[in-house]
């Protein structure tokens, strides 16, 4: 009997399943499940994860074992069992959410005592050698795609150092449109769903499909920003009226 394709989606949104990031994530999962994958979504904000103190115990005293007894042990096990990892996060200050950053720093216990220098950079090798793949899903309030440059570069480095292959990136700016105007993003979201199906059935995602998923839907960022400002002011007014 063929082993089921396992996907672990790690959503770093502070708002968990209520955030915009979850909308895009679920589109990918829908496609993956239609191809027979077993998918699990892990909401980091709902897990007990202590911040790494860089004490070195997992490296020197108890190799591979952190001093904290929290949810990270089970998270690491799930990550190691997955065929595909999905890292999903809203963009905050050009980077990932603090919850996701805290979780990633705790992966230090999975690192071995060995290093490798290649391509002009140092790799801190993992104890568990796998043939995993990964995709990233990022959403941003800002309307311009430049907002993803920093977080994309960071995750390219993280995933590379983990020794796994990045199969695709999905970036959605002006993420409020996922709720306020989903029809505008219909073709992009459909491509995300097809990408989930394709990576399970074919083992990769075609370049053309990734380009469609990341297709531009913001004609004028400045106009979009003006609309965002008006939306926020309206919400403030409504909220204040409710307090009178």
Image (tube, rainbow, N blue to C red):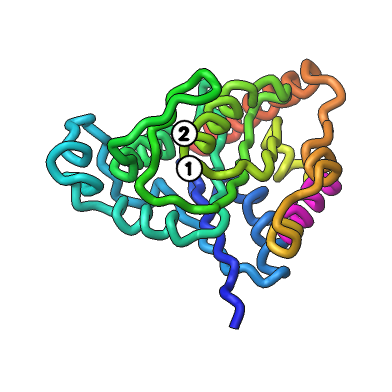
The disc placed on residue 97 is: 2
Task: Tell me if 8 is positioned left or right of 101 in this view.
Answer: right
Residue 187 placement (x, y as % from top left): 85, 47
The residue to which callout 1 is attached is 12
Task: Tell me if 175 is positioned left or right of 16 in this view.
Answer: right
In magenta segment, residue 186? yes
In magenta segment, residue 229? no
Sequence-wise first label, 2 or 1: 1
Residue 60 placement (x, y as % from top left): 16, 37
Which residue is outermost to the left?
61
Tag 1 secondary structure: loop
Tag 2 secondary structure: loop
Which residue is outermost to the bottom?
1
Residue bounds of the magenta highlight: 185-197
| Residue name at image x 64 percent, y 22 percent | 149
Residue 7 placement (x, y as % from top left): 56, 60
| Residue name at image x 55 percent, y 23 percent | 119
Task: Tell me if 195 is positioned left or right of 137 in this view.
Answer: right
């Amino acid at each position: 009997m063929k082993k089921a394709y396992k996907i672990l989606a790690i959503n770093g949104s502070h708002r968990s399943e209520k955030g915009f990031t979850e909308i895009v994530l679920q589109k990918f999962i829908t496609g993956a499940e239609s191809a027979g994958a077993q998918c699990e979504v892990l909401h980091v904000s709902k897990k007990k994860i202590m911040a790494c103190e860089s004490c070195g115990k997992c490296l020197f005293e108890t190799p591979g074992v952190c001093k904290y007894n929290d949810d990270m042990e089970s998270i690491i096990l799930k990550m190691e069992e997955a065929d595909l990892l999905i890292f999903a996060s809203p963009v905050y200050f050009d980077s990932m959410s603090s919850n996701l950053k805290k979780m990633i720093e705790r992966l230090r216990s999975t690192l071995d005592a060995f290093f490798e220098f290649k391509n002009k950079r140092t790799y801190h090798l993992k104890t568990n050698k796998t043939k995993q793949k990964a995709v990233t899903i990022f959403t941003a309030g800002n309307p311009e795609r430049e907002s993803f440059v920093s977080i994309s570069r960071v995750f390219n480095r993280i995933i590379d150092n983990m020794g796994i292959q990045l199969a695709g990136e999905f970036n959605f700016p002006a993420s409020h449109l996922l709720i306020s105007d989903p029809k505008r993003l219909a073709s992009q979201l459909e491509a995300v769903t097809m990408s989930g199906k394709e990576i399970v059935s074919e083992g990769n995602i075609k370049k053309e499909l990734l380009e469609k998923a990341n297709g531009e839907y913001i004609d004028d960022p400045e106009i979009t920003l003006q609309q965002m400002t008006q939306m926020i002011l309206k919400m403030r007014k409504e909220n204040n009226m409710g307090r009178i």
